[in-house]
Amino acid sequence: MTLTGDAGAQGIIRQNPDLNGISIISEDRKAFFDIDTKEDYQLAREGGI
């Protein structure tokens, strides 16, 4: 299983219905900050998320 692009794990989950998971709810946007670019990474390192 590998991920490519900015699709997240959606394809893997759809192709493998036997996988189990849970939903996590959080109002803290830092809990789920998605880093896809160098700019995102820099923003996270600087604490600007």
Image: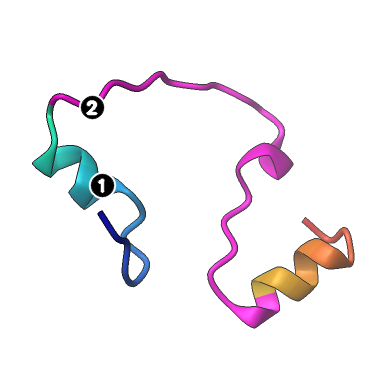
Residue occupying image coordinates x 57% and y 56%: 34
C-beta proximity under 8 Å, tags 2 and 1: no
10 lies above or below 44? above
For badge 1, the amino acid type reads Gln
39 lies above or below 45? below
For badge 2, the amino acid type reads Leu
Disc number for residue 43: none
Left or right side of 19 for 14: left
Of the numbered discs 2 and 1, the one sitting upstream in the chain is 1
Q: Quadrant of the C terminus?
A: bottom right
Display colour scheme:
rainbow
Residue 13 percent location from the top left of the image? 22, 39
- Which mark is in front, 2 or 1? 2
Left or right side of 36 for 9: left
Element carrying mark 1: helix
Q: Quadrant of the N terminus?
A: bottom left
26 lies above or below 49? above
Label 1: how many Cα within 10 Å (few below 14, some 14–19, many 20+): few
Left or right side of 26 for 13: left
Left or right side of 5 for 18: left
Residue 39 percent location from the top left of the image? 68, 79
Q: Which range of residues does the magenta coloring cover? A: 18-39
Per the image, the residue denoted by label 2 is: 19
Residue 25 percent location from the top left of the image? 55, 21
Label 2: how many Cα within 10 Å (few below 14, some 14–19, many 20+): few
Per the image, the residue denoted by label 1 is: 10
